[in-house]
Image (spheres, helix red, strand yellow):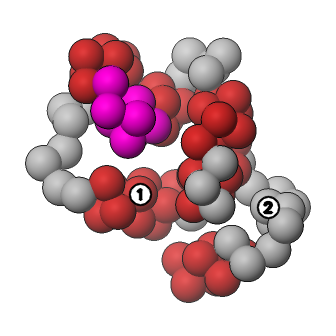
Amino acid sequence: MTFIEFKDSLKSDHPPIGLSVPLKALWFDGKGDWDQAHHEVDHLDDAISALIHAYLHRKEGDTWNADYWYRNAKESRPQISLEEEWEQLVVRFL
């Protein structure tokens, strides 16, 4: 799947079959469903899920919590827009 195909899939009511959990979370976030996106990753402890979790808390405006999750992912909070971060995460995990 390409980034364009992923973005086009946001027109659907359901995520594409076979998406990884991180991509599924990003899909729900792309649909504007922060709660479902968060639900997808909030119980996982791997580095990729921690990075998505960090992005979601950054988007929520909870910088302290976001930084906690960025540290768990062994990454730094990016100094880019949320839209750019979302796109970079999607491309990275496709």
Please report the bounds of the magenta region as a residue range. Answer: 55-62
Q: Is residue 46 above or below residue 25?
A: above
Residue 75 in magenta stretch: no
Position in image of residue 94 (x %, y %): 56, 63
Does residue 16 appear left or right of residue 39 in this picture? right
Indicate the amino acid at tag 2. Answer: Pro
Secondary structure found at label 2: loop
Res. 92 visible in picture:
no
Residue highlighted by disc 1: 86
Does residue 28 appear left or right of residue 74 in this picture? right
The quadrant the N terminus occupies is bottom right
User: Which SS type dominates the magenta stretch?
Assistant: helix
Q: List the single residue furthest toward the left.
A: 79
Task: Pick whichever, 4 or 60, lies toward us.
Answer: 60
Q: Which residue lies at the image location 70% right of the left edge and 38% below the top edge?
A: 36
Task: Pick whichever, 6 or 74, lies toward us.
Answer: 6
Does residue 62 appear left or right of residue 90 in this picture? left
Q: Which of the labelled discs sits on residue 15, or is there none? A: 2
Disc count in the image? 2
